[in-house]
Image: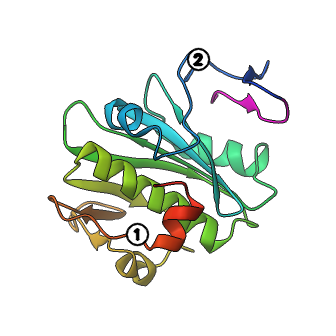
Amino acid sequence: MDLAIDQAGAGTRWSLAAGIAGFGLQSVTNVALGRQLLAARRTGRIVVDQGTLQAIYGRWWPHTGNLMQVLWDMNFRGVQRDRCELFYHEPLSAPGFLTLSYVHSGPQTSLATFYSATLILDEIAKLKRSHAIVCQVTNDRISDRLLDRWGWQRHCPSWSGRHFIKRFYGEYPEISPHWRERLTLG
């Protein structure tokens, strides 16, 4: 279970039903001000609500989704608004690469909100000087054409599933000033 934070009140209050994945780690609400922390952190959770960054939460260990997690999220922990949570980590076995390991969203999540979360992940990859981001796409609503438009390429075609990679190797995509301001990227 992920660490939940009650954002309704002042300060940071931990939810009673939460786990300990990010206990004691400082969250980042402004990417421009939290650059050093994001560059040093190996794993995290990006939360975007209505196309706006809410926070990037650190985690002590990576979150890797599985079929049980997907079923749990679909039936008991569904997202009932325009919100997207994106989990990422830098594997110890592959320094210089980021893994987009799990996306938690719902039917009301807009394309703009999902896109915002991916832009923030791109910025984190830039801060960490990552060579690439890799992921496995299991949702049929995310088309190969959309991923291609956002800079992702098919990867490992001999493996089962839809594997994608977004390569950088020092050439990071330019994020438009509108999105930079909206997402507090600086």
Residue at horizontal 71 percent and vertical 23 percent from the top? 18
Q: Nearer the viewer, residue 182 or 158?
A: 182
Can you identify the residue that label 1 sits on?
Answer: 175
Q: Secondary structure at mark 1?
A: loop
Q: Position of residue 16 (x, y in %)?
A: 79, 18
Q: Looking at the image, which residue sits at the far left?
A: 169
Can you identify the residue that label 2 sits on?
Answer: 23
The quadrant in which residue 81 appears is: bottom right
Residue at horizontal 61 percent and vertical 73 percent from the top? 111
Q: Is residue 7 magenta?
A: yes
The quadrant in which residue 80 appears is: bottom right
The quadrant in which residue 49 appears is: bottom right
Q: Position of residue 71 (x, y in %)?
A: 67, 47
Q: Is residue 139 visible?
A: no
**Magenta-drawn segment:** 1-9
Image side of residue 133 versus residue 143, left or right: left
